[in-house]
């Protein structure tokens, strides 16, 4: 059974960098052609795709966060991470990690609430 679990701080101050990790179990993050992605949902809004890391280690980011986002992976720990720099209150959201397989987001983490406040 594939499982994903987000971890990281629940509260971040404005201008700080958010670092989240997604621990994956039940499948290797370098198996096949799977890709691994981050999605967020601000309060009262829909899902926002943030970026993805492919099986090739190439990355792609949504234009609205591209300039301040990095996604990386640690194959020794079977996990991938998100860094979002220069946080503002508008970055307050529930952050999810998910797997992309056959063009579908088929497995999701439970989500982690991140609040940006001084």
Image (cartoon, grey):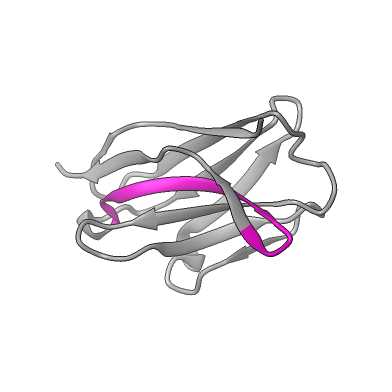
* Viewer-nearest residue: 95 or 91: 95
**The magenta segment:** 91-104
| Above-or-below relation of 84 to 10 | below
Q: Main secondary structure of the magenta part?
A: strand
Residue 18 placement: quadrant: top left
Residue ranking furthest to the front: 1
Residue ranking furthest to the left: 118
Residue ranking furthest to the bottom: 63
| Above-or-below relation of 10 to 17 | above
Residue at figure coordinates x 33%, y 56% from the top left:
41
Question: Per the image, is 89 magenta?
Answer: no
Residue at figure coordinates x 29%, y 42% from the top left:
114
* Viewer-nearest residue: 77 or 97: 97
Residue 101 location (% of width, % of height): 71, 55
Q: How many marks?
A: 0
Residue 19 located left or right of residue 12:
right
Residue at figure coordinates x 38%, y 62% from the top left:
47
Residue at figure coordinates x 85%, y 48% from the top left:
32
Residue 107 location (% of width, % of height): 58, 45
Residue 61 placement: quadrant: bottom right
Residue 116 location (% of width, % of height): 23, 46
Question: Per the image, is 99 magenta?
Answer: yes
* Quadrant in the picture for the N terminus: top right
* Quadrant in the picture for the C terminus: top left
Residue 96 location (% of width, % of height): 45, 46
Residue ranking furthest to the right: 32
């Amino acid at each position: 059974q594939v499982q994903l679990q987000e971890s990281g701080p629940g509260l971040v101050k404005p201008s700080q960098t958010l670092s989240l990790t997604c621990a994956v179990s039940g499948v290797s993050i370098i198996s096949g052609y799977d890709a691994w992605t981050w999605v967020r949902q601000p309060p009262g809004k829909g899902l926002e795709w943030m970026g993805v890391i492919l099986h090739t280690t190439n990355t792609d980011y949504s234009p609205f966060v591209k300039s301040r986002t990095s996604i990386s992976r640690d194959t020794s720990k079977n996990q991938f991470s998100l860094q979002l720099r220069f946080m503002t209150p508008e970055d307050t959201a529930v952050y999810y990690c998910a797997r992309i397989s056959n063009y579908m987001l088929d497995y999701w983490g439970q989500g982690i609430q991140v609040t940006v406040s001084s």
